[in-house]
Every structure is written in structure tokens, then in C-alpha cells.
């Protein structure tokens, strides 16, 4: 019987698939760290109080990249160049989700609307990340090799999602509500399509590494398409709602250190 747990167990148990998984994850997290660091440096003067939280967000993402690289080092494998069709972060940027890298590379202050757009896009992508980590924490939170990393990253992603809710509610109260809702909806509908495409690409590569038979690969692809249809009709709404989070000021302090995997 196919399940998320059994599939991920296969990936973790094989050195080559584990190497690809960690390389993809490390690349995305490191890219997210750079993006947040640049945004923090370019925050407009009226929102400078937000800069330390954006910096913390970026530091967390960078830490996650180091964690995945440390897991590979402990396993005795090295990072692999990731196939472009599996690069979720770069595909998001190419499809207009997040602030354009050309803008972030310039030393020109961002606008308040840029910050609202950044937070709206982050609210969608952090929902995806938090949901994925909840699933991994449930099934692999006590795993002897990756459990510590899963628990730490999951806690961080919950913090990031809470921060996005809290800051977007603040901007909505300041008169940006309509722009936020429009941006959230557009971003969510684009993200679920990109996530489908990336999921198909990643599972295709994993299937070739692990030698999955055609019926198994076809069943997995059908499941990914079915999830996309659900999200296209109903599931996207989970990504656009805003509520006061239980964790308040979730990014109000310094980033925690990465755990040791010696």
C-alpha cells in the first residue's frame, strides 16, 4: 500500500535518493535565506521595525540549508546539482511569486507594497512548508537519523507561518486588506500548480533512482494530479485565510543554532 510514510522511508533508506532529497531541500532553504536577507536590508524606513524579524526568517532558512547539508555529510554523501524542474524556489520566482531577484539585487529601498507582497507570498509558501513538516514530524519525528532535524525545522516553519499571519493582519488593519486578499489568492493558485509540477518532477527522479515499476509511478502521478485538483477547487482557501496566531511575536528573537549531527 502506498503512503507518504512508506514513500519517504524508501527515499531515506537509499543513499542516492536521500542525497537528491537533501540537495533539493538545502538549495531551496539557502535561496530563501538569501531572499529574506536582501529584503531585510531593503525594508523601507517606515517599516524598519520589521527588519529584525525578516532577518530572523532568513537566518532560519539558511540554518535549514546547513542542516540538510550536515545530514548528507553524516551519511557520507555530497550534494548533487539539482534538476531545474525540481527547483521549487526558483520556479516560484520565475512565475512572479516573491519579489523579483533583479529588484533584490539593487540597492534601492523597497516600498510598503513590496513588503505586503512579500508577506502575502510568504504566507502561502510557509503554509506549504508547515504542512509538509507536520506530516514528516508525525511519521519521522523520532527517527534516529533525521528526527532532530525534522522537529527543529517544523517548529521554525510554524513560527514563520505565525509571523506572516500576524504581520499581514497588521497591514490589513492599516488599509491594505484588499491588496492582501487579491495577492494571496493569485499566489495560492499559482503555487499549487508549481507544487504539482515540482512534485511530479521529484517523484519522477526518485522513481528512476529507486527503480519503481510503472504501475507504482503511475499511481503516484495520479495521486499528485488528484491533490492538485482538490487544491484547485477547495484546498487553496486554506492558504489565503488570516487569523490571529497562537504564537505571538514568533520571530521576535534570534534564530536558534543548528543541531549537531556528529
Image: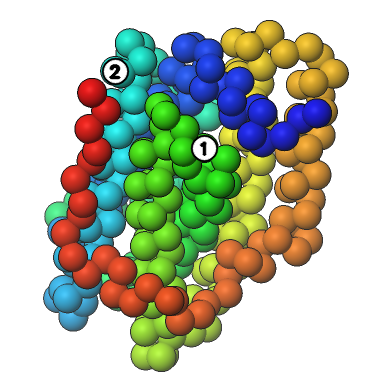
Q: What percent of the width, then of the height, locates residue 23?
A: 40, 25
Question: Is residue 241 something one can see in this rendering?
Answer: yes
Q: Which residue is mark 2?
A: 73
Residue at (42, 29) in percent of width and height: 144
Residue at (42, 50) in percent of width and height: 154
Other-residue count near label 1 (Cα within 10 Å), few / some / many at <14 / 14–19 / ≥20:
many
In contact (CB < 8 Å): disc 1 and disc 2:
no
Q: Given the current orientation, which residue lies at the most extreme right position? A: 215
Q: Secondary structure at mark 2?
A: helix
Residue at (75, 47) in percent of width and height: 227
Question: Is residue 94 something one can see in this rendering?
Answer: no
Distance in Å between CA atoms under marks 1 and 2: 20 Å
For discs 1 and 2, the disc positioned in front in the rendered view: 1
Q: What percent of the width, then of the height, locates residue 251?
A: 27, 66
Q: Quadrant of residue 82?
A: top left
Q: Secondary structure at mark 1?
A: helix
Q: What percent of the width, then of the height, locates residue 246?
A: 43, 76
Residue at (40, 17) in percent of width and height: 81
**Above or below, comparing residue 164 to residue 81 in the picture:** below
Q: Quadrant of residue 63?
A: top left
Q: Which residue is mark 1?
A: 140
Q: What percent of the width, then of the height, locates residue 80?
A: 39, 15
**Of the pair 221 and 11, the residue shown nearer to us:** 11
The quarter of the image holding the N terminus is: top right
> Number of marks in the image?
2
Label number found at residue 20 = none
Please state if 13 lies on the left or on the right of 118 as rendered.
Answer: right
Amino acid at each position: 500500500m502506498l503512503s507518504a510514510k512508506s514513500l519517504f522511508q524508501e527515499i531515506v533508506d537509499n543513499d542516492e535518493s536521500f542525497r537528491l532529497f537533501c540537495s533539493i531541500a538545502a538549495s531551496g532553504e539557502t535561496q530563501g535565506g538569501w531572499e529574506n536577507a536582501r529584503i531585510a536590508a531593503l525594508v523601507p524606513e517606515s517599516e524598519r521595525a520589521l527588519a529584525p524579524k525578516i532577518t530572523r526568517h532568513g537566518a532560519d532558512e539558511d540554518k535549514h540549508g546547513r542542516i540538510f547539508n550536515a545530514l548528507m555529510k553524516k551519511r557520507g554523501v555530497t550534494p548533487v546539482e539539482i534538476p531545474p524542474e525540481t527547483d521549487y524556489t526558483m520556479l516560484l520566482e520565475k512565475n512572479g511569486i516573491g519579489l523579483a531577484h533583479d529588484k533584490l539585487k539593487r540597492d534601492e529601498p523597497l516600498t510598503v507594497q513590496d513588503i505586503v507582497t512579500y508577506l502575502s507570498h510568504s504566507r502561502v509558501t510557509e503554509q506549504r512548508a508547515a504542512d509538509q513538516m507536520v506530516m514528516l514530524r508525525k511519521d519521522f519525528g523520532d527517527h534516529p537519523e533525521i528526527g532532530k532535524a525534522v522537529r527543529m525545522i517544523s517548529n521554525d516553519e510554524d513560527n514563520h507561518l505565525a509571523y506572516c499571519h500576524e504581520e499581514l493582519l497588521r497591514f490589513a488593519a492599516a488599509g491594505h486588506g484588499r491588496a492582501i486578499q487579491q495577492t494571496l489568492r493569485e499566489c495560492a493558485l499559482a503555487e499549487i500548480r508549481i507544487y504539482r509540477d515540482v512534485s511530479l518532477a521529484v517523484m519522477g527522479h526518485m522513481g528512476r533512482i529507486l527503480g519503481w515499476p510503472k504501475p507504482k509511478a503511475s499511481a503516484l502521478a495520479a495521486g499528485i494530479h488528484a491533490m492538485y485538483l482538490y487544491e484547485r477547487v477547495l484546498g487553496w482557501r486554506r492558504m489565503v485565510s488570516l487569523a490571529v496566531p497562537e504564537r505571538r511575536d514568533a520571530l521576535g528573537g534570534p534564530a536558534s543554532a543548528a543541531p549537531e549531527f556528529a
